[in-house]
Amino acid sequence: MSKLFSPVTLGKQTLPNRIVIAPMCQYSAVDGQATDWHLIHLGHLALSGAGLLYIEATAVTPAGRISPSDLGLWSDQTEAALARVLKGIRQYSAMPIAIQLAHAGRKASTQVPWEGGKQIVPTNGGWQTEAPSALSWDGGELPPLALGQAELSRIRDAFVAAAQRAHRLGIEVVELHAAHGYLLHQFLSPLSNVRDDRYGGSLENRLRFPLEVFDAVREALPADVPLGIRISATDWIDGGWDVEQSVAFAKELQQRNCAFIHVSSGGLSPLQQIPATPGYQVPFAERIKRETGLPTIAVGLITDPEQAEQIVASGQADMVALARGILYNPRWPWHAAAKLGAQVTAPKQYLRSQPAAFKNLLKA
């Protein structure tokens, strides 16, 4: 029996299988508000048969957006726009939905990728970025402002407010984004955090603000709402954040009722040297799972059903997340179920589509 298609529990939320659709920025919001693109994009992925669907990285403040076109959840207007999208999806899909709450820190105020992705300065329609320290992601960029205590409290409270809005929307799983060089990751790494106060220097100090955010969000949500976190297990740079520090961070999170860790890597600096091969990040998820017992989501060039099956069947991770691969093939779970002799949920309108050789593949 396929392990990939067996149920898994996050907190009190049971997923029907272990295939996760990773959060993928769409750069298609207007003033932080979800649009018809989000209804189309998330709607068709909600028909894929995966176990969990992530909404993309969702900014908790306007200044926390990667680009002016990023999705947000900081106001009644952004909440209402996302509510409309979710209503449309849930009319036809019961797939559990997760949201990734984020603040881009020094990587904010950029062009959308298809326009080059370069920093937009305030005089050209961008905004002043903010970070743990006044160090830019790229030496040619306008440096961010180093955050003071009042600003840290404001951002922490913004994460809390966004999580409460997500809960009001009926979103089943909440994740904090502490990966890919964004704000919480910037606090973790000694390459981006050179503060000399209680939030910088030692590992204990660099963990402090991300843990304060996690604690505040965990306290604000009902105990039965799974709260997890996405991390970059390593910066892929000597002297930066690494897997040993990630394990230490995970152990702190384990004591705080963290439901899962979504394990990625990189994104902090353009100097990173990433050996991108199939499943290259899986060993990080495996180690964190082994040393903490926390459920893990593995991600990164996982494209083959047999590969995904082996990852979860061997215990390297509890779930696998697909990103670009499922954009290319939105019915990946259907094809994986066919290969692995499993069954997957599909809309009743599509039940007649299954080939005769797999007549028991799809179920409503």
Image: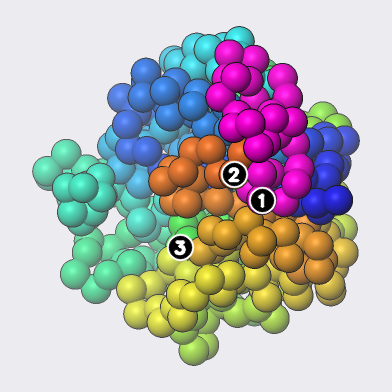
Q: Point out residue 328 in the picture as x, y percentages from the top left corner.
A: 41, 46
Q: Is residue 252 visible?
A: no
Check disc 1 and give the amino acid type: Lys
- Image mark count: 3
Binning the other alpha carbons within 10 Å of mark 1 as few (below 14), some (14 to 19) or many (20 upward) gives few
Residue at 87% from the left image edge and 64% from the top image edge: 293
Q: Point out residue 203 in the picture as x, y percentages from the top left corner.
A: 66, 76
Check disc 3 and give the amino acid type: Gly
On the image, numbered disc 1 is attached to which residue? 339
Q: Is residue 80 above or below residue 75?
A: above
Quadrant location, the C terminus: top right
Give whichever of 178, 28 is nearer the camera. Answer: 28
Q: Point out residue 242 in the picture as x, y percentages from the top left corner.
A: 60, 79
Bounds of the magenta span? 336-364
Looking at the image, do the residues carrying marks 1 and 2 touch, with CB atoms under 8 Å apart?
A: yes
Residue 335 is tagged as 2
Q: Point out residue 290 in the picture as x, y percentages from the top left corner.
A: 84, 72
Residue 181 is tagged as 3
Asked if residue 1 is among those painted magenta in the image, a careful observer would answer: no
Q: Is residue 244 above or below residue 318?
A: below
Q: Give the image quarter of residue 63.
A: top left
Structural distance between the alpha carbons of marks 1 and 3: 36 Å
Q: Nearer the viewer, mark 1 or mark 3?
A: 1
Structural distance between the alpha carbons of marks 2 and 3: 34 Å
Asked if residue 342 is among those painted magenta in the image, a careful observer would answer: yes
